[in-house]
Amino acid sequence: MSSTNPNVFAASRNEVEPQLAGVHDPALQLVSDWQMARYVSLLLCRVQQRLESRMMVNTGNWGLTADLRNQVESQAGHTGRESEAYAVAREAEVLAMTETLKLQDIIPEVAASSLMGVIAKLEMIVGADRDIGDPTDFPWPHIASVLRDLKAVAGELPPYRPDRASTRADAARYWQNACTLVRALADEDALLNATTL
């Protein structure tokens, strides 16, 4: 099983994380951590989807592939590696999304010490709803309205621009943890299969 990271982790431009000068608000650090975890989980989701698409196209099924004999022969060795990489990518995405959800869960425990911190917490709440729910149900339009009002009074948070090195490091960490998990599950399955024979 490959523990190397796909080239997809490379960012396309040199990006830096914005800092609010002179503001030391725990809610701002929380939103920064949440944005990074969310960004990495979306990145890993794309990796997983690409591998899934590749596996669907390269089924080795003679009725579904273009160049029948050559493609089946060339893909025979790749199918096992692709399914392993897909399993790792899927687990890495789950680990990153779990981190995102954990950060969302601690919103009530973090006290904002500025209006920007309040805006940051509301951004996380509204952003989380975009991912998992219907933003037209109560209270989401109301919370979004309060967020717009606060932004009109206090200003916007700087746009999120993830740091390339941090993104790569986080993605690599989730990838390595996923490799370890998938390897452990494969070893456990092999042990169970060996004992049942």
Image (tube, rainbow, N blue to C red):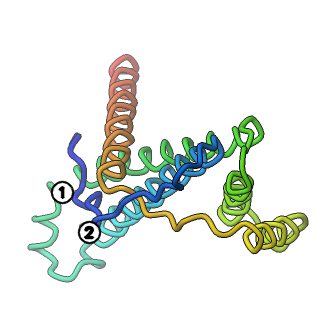
Other-residue count near label 1 (Cα within 10 Å), few / some / many at <14 / 14–19 / ≥20: some
Q: Position of residue 73 (x, y in %)?
A: 11, 65
- The residue nearer to you, when weighing 138 against 74, is 138
Q: Element at badge 1?
A: helix
- The residue nearer to you, when weighing 176 against 61, is 176
Which residue is at a point 68% across and 69% down the rendered structure image? 155
Q: Quarter holding the C terminus?
A: top left
Q: Which residue is mark 1?
A: 78
- Labels 2 and 1 touching (C-beta < 8 A): yes
In which image quadrant can residue 172 be found?
A: top left
Residue type (three-letter) at the residue carrying disc 1: His
Residue type (three-letter) at the residue carrying disc 2: Asn
Q: Position of residue 87 (x, y in %)?
A: 38, 47
Q: Position of residue 142 (x, y in %)?
A: 88, 69
Q: Which mark is residue 148?
A: none
In which image quadrant can residue 120 be found?
A: bottom right
Q: Which residue is mark 2?
A: 58
